[in-house]
Image: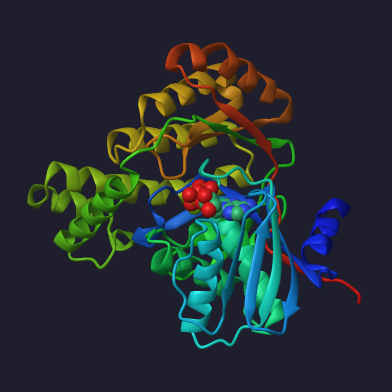
Amino acid sequence: MSQAFINTFQQLYAAQPEGLSSAPGRVNLIGEFTDYNLGYVFPAALNFRTQVLFRARTDQQIVVHSQNYPGESDRFSLQAPMTPGPSQWGNYIRAMVYVLQQAGFTLTGADLLIDSDVPQGAGLSSSAALEVAIGGAFNQLSGLALTPAQIALFGQQAENQFMNCQCGIMDQMISAQATAGHALLLDCATLATRAVAIPPELALVIVNSNYPRKLVDSEYNGRRQDCEQAAAIMGVSTLRDASMDLLQQHKNAMTAQQYKRAHHVISENARVLATVDALQQSDMTQLRLLMQASHQSLRDDFEVTVPATDGLVEICQTALGSKGAVRMTGGGFGGAIICLCAQQDVVLVEQAVAAHYQARFGLKADVYVCQAGAGLTVQTFAA
Ligand code: ADP
Ligand code: MG
């Protein structure tokens, strides 16, 4: 955290901050569209973070500025019913207040200043980082004694109930609970977690296609419905409880589309568990095959890739050959791809993207070379 950040807080609020809450963005190594089917996901936090300086106020007001939106702010009372305000980003803070108040907590007024290097709208979950960092600040200021997992659940509720985004629990859980240098196996049915070390020589290379995403919400909701219907046909409450054998038995009772959606989810759950083993053994061949199979399943069965992300995967996998594992990551319909490779091979990805992506797709990609970061931290400053 920089001195300039603290100085800005002092200038805005004419007082010292009392503490700092900080939460990371994330990338998913594997396990796509499995979270809302109560299966497995395997994300890692990034070394990109959203930081919130905070201080208590005595007048029941929340005042918030973001260094990422210079000159803008939001201000609202904790005593009025919580409604969306004029600031789009300010609504994430209102959303956290809303869900905490709904749960019966009494919040203290606060001065807040946000700063973040998590790219926004790139599929690295800047929204979850913001929710978890704000949750950490309220937890400290109001003495709520919430665990990181509880803060994560409130972050998901904020998206579901206030921001109209029906996301699963993955993004907030990894942001709240990550261990530096590790990915996190998360069982979305029980919320049990297991930190798995990422070999230190491996880089997490994220390439954002910058493909313009459209109709994402309706497509997302449609797939969710297909999964629920396929589970109902098989007589299980979620696809977590289905097997490939069960799927084959019920194939004729399903539409081709329901069958493909379920086939992706059931096969992807198995790939997550196999990837955990492959990572622990630093088995790059296995990692590559699993990530390739995941991408193909997302392309052919779940149908959430676009030519630009299929092309980016092909460009990067061709450049890395046997030295890397590549697939799309996140919600699809554009967004980012992830490459796992040794630090010294990152340059192969950078060169191949520069040489081929824009020429083929007319878009400029952003390449982020990341390490697995730590989850939520909250510190208070000596008075
Ligand atoms: P993603 O989570 O993939 O980055 P979203 O659309 O879900 O994309 O969330 C991005 C939104 O989150 C931004 O448009 C903004 O409203 C809010 N946000 C994220 N980071 C910040 C920040 N540092 N300051 C203010 N708002 C932020
Ligand atoms: Mg988001």
Say if residue 2 shows up in the picture.
no
Residue 353's spot in the image, x, y percent?
A: 57, 19
Q: Nearer the viewer, residue 68 or 1?
A: 68
Place residue 140 in its image quadrant: bottom right
Compared with 284, 63 (above or below) is below
Residue 124's spot in the image, x, y percent?
A: 55, 46
Say if residue 124 shows up in the picture.
yes
Compared with 8, 284 (above or below) is above
Residue 302's spot in the image, x, y percent?
A: 30, 41
Q: Nearer the viewer, residue 273 or 131?
A: 131
Residue 315's spot in the image, x, y percent?
A: 50, 19
Residue occupying image coordinates x 68% and y 46%: 117
Residue occupying image coordinates x 63% and y 16%: 351
Left or right: 302 as drawn, with respect to 380: left
Compared with 76, 173 (above or below) is above
Residue occupying image coordinates x 61% and y 24%: 323
